[in-house]
Image (cartoon, rainbow, N blue to C red):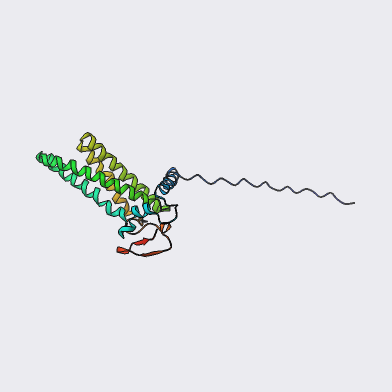
């Protein structure tokens, strides 16, 4: 007679743990990048005229780092005018601070638009550095806007802190964004490129 085989128990496979959800800043960055790419036409077929305009293809150099000199210089002059006004209480220093705040805000508007366009093509560590850079600069811009509406010079002093942190963060970053001194990230480049000024790469879009 044959013996009945003893059933062998197979251990149940443990369920595969679900991957952790990405941090809030990463999810926010994904959403913002998608919206910006839709607005500037990153997903359209070339020529992408608006994107090329904001990137600086026509200029032969990234446009964002050029425009950022305007608000930085203007707001540094604002600080100088504020110091002169506090010491001498001269009318021209007060008007000078008022004008330079406005010039800085106008320049900041252009820097924000061009900077977000460049940032929308970044990823990884470069995207995280750019996100923090934008956050500090946006804080400084809001503070200068508040100081313009209420005429409070102490608010402008506070605004120098996030403005300084934005620049300092780019200098000490181990992975500086490519849009600081060169063209955008390789993700944004098409296959046809030609050398640009100061090592930049100009893409036909």
- Count all numbered tags in the image, as a single digit: 0
Q: Tell me what residue is drawn at x 53 percent, y 46 percent.
A: 19
**Residue 154 percent across, percent down from the top left:** 21, 37
Residue 131 seen anywhere in this rendered image of the structure: yes
29 relative position to 14: left or right: left
**Residue 45 percent across, percent down from the top left:** 45, 55
**Residue 16 percent across, percent down from the top left:** 59, 47
Residue 129 seen anywhere in this rendered image of the structure: no
Q: Quadrant of residue 186?
A: bottom left
Farthest-out residue, bottom = 195
Q: Tell me what residue is drawn at x 27 percent, y 51 percent.
A: 68
**Residue 131 percent across, percent down from the top left:** 37, 47
Task: Look at the picture and state if 2 lies above or below 98.
Answer: below
126 relative position to 1: left or right: left
Q: Quadrant of the C terminus?
A: bottom left
141 relative position to 89: left or right: right
Q: Decide which of 83, 44 is in the foreground and name it.
A: 44
Q: Decide which of 35, 53 is in the foreground and name it.
A: 53
Q: Quadrant of residue 87?
A: top left
Farthest-out residue, right = 1
Farthest-out residue, top = 150
């Amino acid at each position: 007679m044959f013996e009945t085989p003893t059933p062998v128990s197979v251990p149940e496979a443990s369920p595969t743990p679900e991957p952790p959800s990405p941090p809030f800043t990463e999810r926010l960055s994904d959403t913002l990048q998608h919206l910006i790419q839709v607005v500037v036409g990153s997903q359209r077929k070339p020529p992408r005229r608006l994107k090329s305009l904001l990137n600086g293809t026509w200029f032969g150099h990234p446009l964002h780092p050029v425009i950022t000199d305007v608000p930085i210089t203007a707001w540094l002059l604002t600080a100088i005018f504020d110091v002169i006004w506090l010491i001498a209480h001269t009318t021209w220093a007060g008007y000078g601070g008022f004008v330079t705040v406005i010039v800085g805000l106008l320049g900041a508007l252009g820097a924000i638009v061009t900077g977000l366009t460049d940032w929308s093509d970044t990823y990884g560590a470069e995207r995280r550095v750019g996100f923090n850079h934008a956050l500090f600069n946006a804080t400084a811009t809001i503070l200068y806007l508040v100081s313009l509406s209420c005429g409070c010079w102490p608010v402008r002093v506070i605004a120098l802190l996030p403005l300084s942190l934005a620049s300092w963060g780019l200098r000490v970053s181990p992975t500086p964004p490519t849009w600081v001194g060169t063209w955008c990230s390789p993700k944004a480049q098409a296959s046809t490129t030609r050398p640009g000024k100061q090592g930049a790469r100009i893409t036909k879009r």
